[in-house]
Image (spheres, helix red, strand yellow):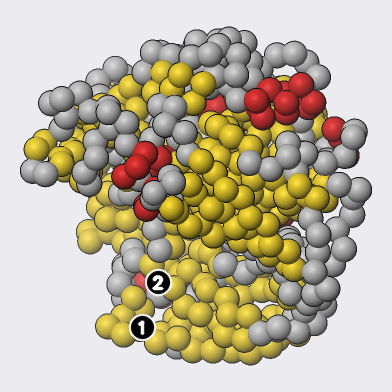
Amino acid sequence: MVKSLLSRATVPSALAILFSVMSAAPSAAQVNYVTRGGETVAVQSVQQRQDAPSAVAEDVAFLGYTNMEVDRNACLGFDDFGDPGVSLQAIRLSPEMLAPHVGKQLSGMRFGVGEEVDDVTVFVRKTLTGENVVEANVSKCGPTWNYVKFDEPLTIDGTELYVGYSYYHEGERYVIGNDPSGFVDGSCYLGYKSALEDYFDDYSSEMWDMGMLLIQAVIGDDLADYGRSVSLIDTDLPVNVQQDAPLDVTLDVFNTSWDAANSIVVTAKVGDEEVGTKTYDFDGGLQPRTSAEIVWEDLVLSEAANVAFEISTVDGKSNAATLQYWSQDCGVYEGEGFPRKLVLEYFSGQGCQNCPTGTEAVNALIFGHEDDVVCITDHAYGYDNFTSEGATYYWNFFNTSGNAPMMMLDRKKRTLFFLEGEGEASVTGVVLHPTQFAFANNYRNFLDAEVAAPARVSVLIDQEYDEETDVLTITVSGRRTETLAGSHVGLTVMVLEDGQVAYQNGASDDYVHDNILRDVLSDFKGDVIEWGEDGSYEMTYRYEIPEQFVSYVSNVTTTPNRRNMRIAAFVSDFADDREGCTVYNANEADFIEETYPSGLSETAIDEPVKVWVGDGTFHAAVAGEELDVQVFNLVGVMLPNNGIGAGTYIIRATDADGKIFTTKMAVTE
């Protein structure tokens, strides 16, 4: 059975429990999102359906319903409707399950979660809604199975027990590890405590079909061996690598147990061949519930192959982690390749009531790949204040439905798979109403593969500014590694702007419009590139930056904020047939700071503005003066300026004279 993520009909509660993706079957690749250097990046693995290993120590048993490793694409989550609270997950250990273990110690637990979670309470209860008779508090859990040892074990007397964990949940997070391949009575109890609700219900029956929770009781007197559990969470191994070129691969490891780890042994295999074993020592030890990065140096691939890493031992003894392996199929390419960015063009309009939802869909589509995609919003629908001539041209050429929203990805016909109801369907890369696949996960595999494939042409952007003439000179250059197919391979250069606060049908008068296509500096089809003998190119554009833009259809003027403006450039083949257009590579760059002073309007703050978060509230100040702050989410909905959690926000700060500063700011936990 396939459940739609958007459906709430299957759960008799105002707080609906949702699947994070719609398929119970294993997919070809898992997408993991990690933060490195302040940036969120996506990496792939094929770790999805491996079974967690059985006990590594004698006289230790695991009691539960499934041994499957965490599949991040099959986790459960809660839609809390703006009312965060505590989620509770538990399984029932029946008297029949416990009978062989009467008199033994229930000494700990292991449980699987789909992302890092803070402040988790692990518990054992006599009744589902009773008091915790045994509990342990864990500061952080990693996205795999985590081991917890109780300070005071519980002696099993044969009566039923409920074992589980709880944590503070903030809406639509798909954290709860489960095995969706089947159901067993007692395998899935889900609860929630908030200002609105307090319940704990059985979802393990066939009627609900929520799968089996990744929770197991650990029975045994000595759990010392399970204090050595270091999981291999992520790698930055590309899906495609340069043939015979040494590559350094970063491995992200997480100590999923209660003891510090001083050293680990890692083995690497390419295909069936073991290519090395290395020991990594942690200065001061890798503390419990913490992560670290290690580097496997000089990995070489001569041909396409599966690459696998394994943490085999911790401190000289067997590794108890359930996620010891990382395996990925890698392709190879000859010669040099360039980092790749995709172009996503989204047709929108202020009068389009579906466009805010479509924008949400676009944001969902590129989640984890924000830095890999150049987003362009063509305001070309109806009587719109931001419409440019270029947006109108592209709308007339690419549009087939006459309605917004509409989206193109790399101007090339593609097949994106999504799940709708109980069947699989496909749509082309020119998509009407992207909400069809907005909250699915399987399209990420498509983006991963596209971004990972090296581009055959580079796109570099340089800028120079002349303050006297208020002219920005943009130079775009690069080089190709092979001949690019097409009869009109050209360079397109655009000017974009974020942060324009204005009316939007379907949202509000304070909606934040981003990625607005303001100008096209090249020919709309792109200026045909003349390649040098070495495959290089260089093209220069002069841009007289206007103080105001005039809508191409409504004649309404709007004032830009140069701090929020940028250059987008891409190399593409513009075919006469819209389905034959291809984007080969793209890049973007913010306007350089030298342009800011001359671009200040009478309503813009002309001094450096400091924005920060304190006690869950955004603050802004200029020259020591605190500013009035409004907070919006990425789809332009105004939020209360308190209780700010992790996420990306639009900040609008206003001084006493009514001057305005708008910026986008990311908050991490």
Residue type at tag 1:
Phe
SS for callout 2: strand
Pick out the residue farthest to the left.
Answer: 624
| Rendering coords of residue 358 (x, y %) | 59, 24
Q: Do the residues labelled 2 and 1 touch (CB within 8 Å)?
A: yes
Residue type at tag 2:
Ala
Q: Which of 578 and 540 is in front in this view?
A: 540
Badge 2 is on which residue?
A: 292
Q: Residue 8 carries which label?
A: none
Q: Which residue is located at x 39 percent, y 49 percent?
A: 468
Q: Which of marks 2 and 1 is nearer the N terminus?
A: 1
Badge 1 is on which residue?
A: 282
Work out whether 378 lies above or below 120.
above
| Rendering coords of residue 464 (x, y %) | 48, 57
Work out whether 232 lies above or below 33.
below
Image-based side of 436 in relation to 527, left or right:
left
Image-based side of 564 in relation to 449, left or right:
left
Q: Which residue is located at x 74 percent, y 74 percent?
A: 336
Work out whether 275 lies above or below 552.
below
Q: Is residue 272 visible?
A: no
Q: Which residue is located at x 57 percent, y 85 percent?
A: 297
| Rendering coords of residue 552 (x, y %) | 60, 19
